[in-house]
Amino acid sequence: MMEKEKKKVLIVIDVQNDFVTGSLGTPEAQAIIPNVKEKFDKYKNNNDYVIFTKDTHQSNYLDTQEGRNLPVEHCIIYSHGWEIIPELKLYAKEVFTKRTFGSVELAKELLESDYDEIEIVGLCTDICVVSNALLLKAFAPELKITVDASCCAGVRPETHKAALETMKMCQINVIAE
């Protein structure tokens, strides 16, 4: 009996100008971009699904709960900082606009598509990557969810590591540290 082919999806979280070279950019974020590109190529060559997310805020960001706690304007809709970085923009054919760290809507959409495996890469490990990974795990505890640490960067190296440890404790497969 032939084994059914596994359906896989790669989620590329928030590789936007503001998180790489802009208002919240870091050297660590810049350093992972070649790894993310390589991961994207692997998925596309296998005809697997790839979806990019975009952190999205309105012009009143500083007046929001998040803005009061992180008072750095970023990813304001239609701004340069909101755009996917130039190195990956041409590859971002499927884009999901999210307005929160972790998106329940994205999780539901992916789970309705009956994927066998979900891999997550991107920015920031300690905010949006961990939030989306934990949401998916909460909705589908038996689903294989992987985070490739070599394709992620956090706000700070120590919080990146802490987020990876949190995900490991919640039975998310963390690879390539």
Image (cartoon, rainbow, N blue to C red):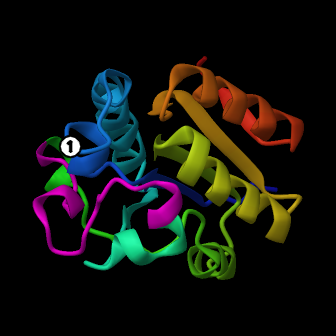
Quadrant position of residue 83: bottom left
Q: Which residue sits at x=14%, y=67%? A: 79
Q: Which residue is mark 1?
A: 22
Residue 104 pos. (x, y %): 65, 77
Residue 107 pos. (x, y %): 64, 73
On screen, residue 144 above or below 79: above
Q: Which residue sits at x=58%, y=72%? A: 103
Classed neighbour count for the residue bearing mark 1: other residues with Cα under 10 Å, few (<14), some (14–19), many (≥20): some
On screen, residue 162 above or below 130: above
Name the kind of residue labelled 1 in the image. Gly
Q: Which residue sits at x=46%, y=54%? A: 70
* Foreground of the two, 151 or 91: 151
Residue 161 pos. (x, y %): 65, 24
From the image, give the main secondary structure of the stretch colored magenta. loop
Q: Which residue sits at x=69%, y=75%? A: 111
Quadrant position of residue 8: bottom right
Residue 139 pos. (x, y %): 81, 71
Dot 1: element: loop
* Foreground of the two, 168 or 118: 168
Q: Is residue 161 shown to the viewer in this render?
A: yes
Residue 101 lies in the magenta-colored region: no
Which residue sits furthest top? 177
Residue 84 lies in the magenta-colored region: yes
Q: Quadrant of the N terminus?
A: bottom right
How many badges with numbers are in the image? 1
On screen, residue 121 above or below 59: above
Question: Range of the magenta residues?
Answer: 67-86
